[in-house]
Image (cartoon, rainbow, N blue to C red):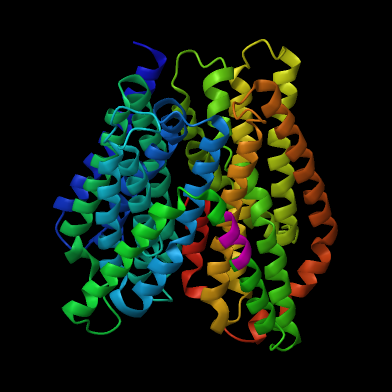
Amino acid sequence: MSEAAIIAATATAVLAAFLLGGAVIAIRRGPAFAGHPKGLYMLFFAEMWERFSYYGMRAILIFYLTQHWLFSDARSTLIYGAYTSLVYITPVLGGWLADRYLGQRKAVLFGGVLLAVGHGLMAVEGTGGQNDPTINVFWAALAFIIVGSGFLKANISVMVGQLYPLTDGRRDAAYTIFYMGINVGAAIGTILVAYLGQTYGWGWGFGLAGIGMLAGLVVFVLGRGSLNGAGEPPAPLARPREWSFYGIGLVAVAVAWGLVQAQGVIQALLAVSGVLLLAYVLRESFKLPERPRERMFAILFLISLNPVFWGLFEQAGGSMNLFTDRFVDRGGVPAGIFQSINPIYIILLAPLFAMLWQWLARRGREPSAPSKFGIALLQMGLANLVLVWGARAVGLEVMTPVILVFAYYLLATTAELCLSPVGLSAMNRLAPAHLASLIMGAWFYMTAVGNFVAGKIGEATGGHGGEMTKARLLEVYDLFGWITIGVGVGVLVLAPLVKRWMHLEALKDEEPLAGAEASGAAGVEGVRA
């Protein structure tokens, strides 16, 4: 049995164990299991399957673009970046419609249907090449997944919190359980979809991703009774009005279908809307008293670092995936499977980081949020440089040792754990109550910008001819590694000033913490959204 088959068999066994555990929970009588409502476990498995499908498809998307639709490396990474940036923008629409009209449950259900359609369409291969009319089905598949993610991703984690009273001490533990579903689904889905897709054919991989999404949808529908009313509409909703909101979602699919093909338009929209968003936030900030105003300045400082970090981190599914496929001694293991390293590292390391921050806090030595951002940027830049130095040390003509890929993802993951959950927690803590949703939207907006930046950086690895070379990729990684380290040093220098702007010592004496009731969710979604 090959190494790839052993890895896939192991992932299948782990999946089977989780499903067996889910069956045991389902057949147990009573509304709770192990001290938590059964609705938590239903949401765990629904989200696990959704992440299974999303990250599984993401692991082989770049190869589908280059090997089946025959786009150049540069264009493929740009398309990939445009797609992932739109995935981070659409939750603004899905969250807004759920909060005001549909409720989270119906929004998640609608998003699940769109995702199932999208993943099903991904399995329609056609003959390949950009002149194949079937490519329009592919664009439609991406559009359905983009909008479906917006409706589901924005709302399912909110439902976890709705299962508990605001003062319930079980909330943090509940989000820890839910977070495991996210990462288990991401790891297993990546391994199995990549194995099938790159070993037996694209249709097999994308088909499995579609089956995973359908499984999540079935779990969510059948488990409705365990939600105890969580996620219902804020007010009674007439059927025609409800369907009009679903119509808005379908219009959004049509818009996404056009945008994902027009990356230049996305770039212009991100730039214009970013300037408008900044102007609005600044205008609102200057209306505030001194302390809240300075906290808004701290928020803007932290948010502005998102494009730098995610621009490098999101090379994972694009240029780094291509590099692993072509220039790494993989021992016959499909390159897409290496995308599972990050979620596996998160499962192993996130509890250690949580304990580390608590241990340092008890001794008064925990780094501030801006300091953690600076440390994250240093690690992300170092991840690039370790890969560059190692690959150059063994020689450009020699296949790069696979240990360097593991080292790259280790540093990238520890960087992620220093920035993503920390940043979301800071947004919740620092934002004035009346601007909390806007600030969270701005955070994800700048994450979307970072994903598009990742596409542009990936495009640069293709050079003028559009095809990646090992030397060109290492040159680009080296440049942006040093740039990111330079930014990280600058952030550490400014961290004391930004910390003073946060006025943490006065938070308990002023307005209630915005979004404090969702503090558990922040750490979860930020780690692997």
Q: Looking at the image, how many numbered discs can be counted on the residues?
A: 0
Looking at the image, residue 93 sits to the left or right of residue 118; the answer is right
Q: In this orientation, which residue lies closer to the viewer: 106 or 295?
A: 106
The picture quadrant where one finds residue 234 is bottom left
| Range of residues picked out in magenta | 267-272
Residue found at x 45% / y 18%: 333
- Based on the picture, tell me whether residue 24 belongs to the magenta stretch: no
Looking at the image, residue 296 sits to the left or right of residue 148; the answer is right
x, y percentage for residue 173?
42, 59
Residue found at x 69% / y 89%: 287
- Residue 62, visible in the rendered structure: yes
Looking at the image, residue 345 sits to the left or right of residue 7; the answer is right
Looking at the image, residue 90 sits to the left or right of residue 159; the answer is right
The picture quadrant where one finds residue 502 is bottom right
The picture quadrant where one finds residue 336 is top left
Relative to 395, does residue 442 appear above or below in the rendering?
A: below
Q: In this orientation, which residue lies closer to the viewer: 118 or 220?
A: 118
x, y percentage for residue 254?
35, 58
Residue found at x 72% / y 81%: 293
Main SS type for the magenta part? helix
x, y percentage for residue 498?
78, 67
Relative to 30, does residue 456 appear above or below in the rendering?
A: above
Residue found at x 63% / y 24%: 404
